[in-house]
Image (cartoon, rainbow, N blue to C red):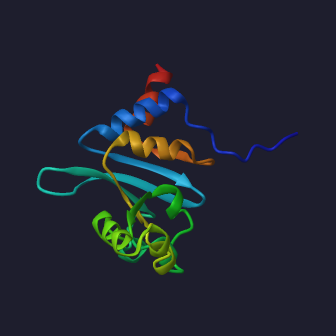
Amino acid sequence: MTKLTKQPLISKPMWKALEAELAGGWVNVAFRYKGYEVSIARVRQSESKTCLSVYIDGVIEGAWISRLDKQPDDAPSILRDVWKLKSIAKYKPKMIADIEKIYGKRRAKKECPDLHQRIEYLLPYFAKASVLCSQFKKLDGLALIKADCLTAANSGGEA
């Protein structure tokens, strides 16, 4: 006798329905992942622009939005999995060009070894539902616990 402990996988048609729901104006979706509840809501980013916001156990701590190398100790372990990884160049292209013009490429690398480095940080915001879904599809053990398409699929199967 084998005991199944894995959560049921989210099927391809369910992902399509979920993506369509996330693209809508009102979003109320929740997942269970590694013991955390990951909820998604559409929030206003500016006066005329909205985005999808990913909450972990119902909150987004301001301290969690920081550089990857300076994450606080109390940050959830799943941040890197469920939030969007962004990066920015440490120096602007104009500054890099000026330094390389002054020193030459070889000496610029010697004098400023971090000249072409990038700073990585995590953000809880996704501009498009397709980007969020493609990142979440890669997660093993992700279980959908609340969505309108989930209730529609359950009520449609009973009839």
Vertical order, 25 against 100 (above or below): above
Q: What residue occupies the far right of the structure in this picture?
A: 1
Of 77 and 90, nearer the camera is: 90
Percent x, y for residue 86?
A: 40, 59
Of 99 and 23, nearer the camera is: 99
Q: What residue occupies the far top of the structure in this picture?
A: 159
Residue 36 in the figure: left or right of residue 40: right
Of 93 and 10, nearer the camera is: 93
Q: Residue at x 53, y 53 (%)?
A: 32
Q: Residue at x 50, y 75 (%)?
A: 113
Q: How many marks?
A: 0
Percent x, y for residue 27?
A: 31, 45
Residue 3 in the figure: left or right of residue 122: right
Q: Residue at x 53, y 57 (%)?
A: 81
Percent x, y for residue 159?
A: 46, 19
Residue 111 in the figure: left or right of residue 89: right
Is residue 142 visible in the rendered image? The answer is yes
Quadrant of the frame with the N terminus? top right
Vertical order, 158 against 26 (above or below): above
Q: Residue at x 59, y 61 (%)?
A: 35
Percent x, y for residue 128?
A: 33, 43
Vertical order, 30 against 63 (above or below): above
Vertical order, 96 against 125 (above or below): below
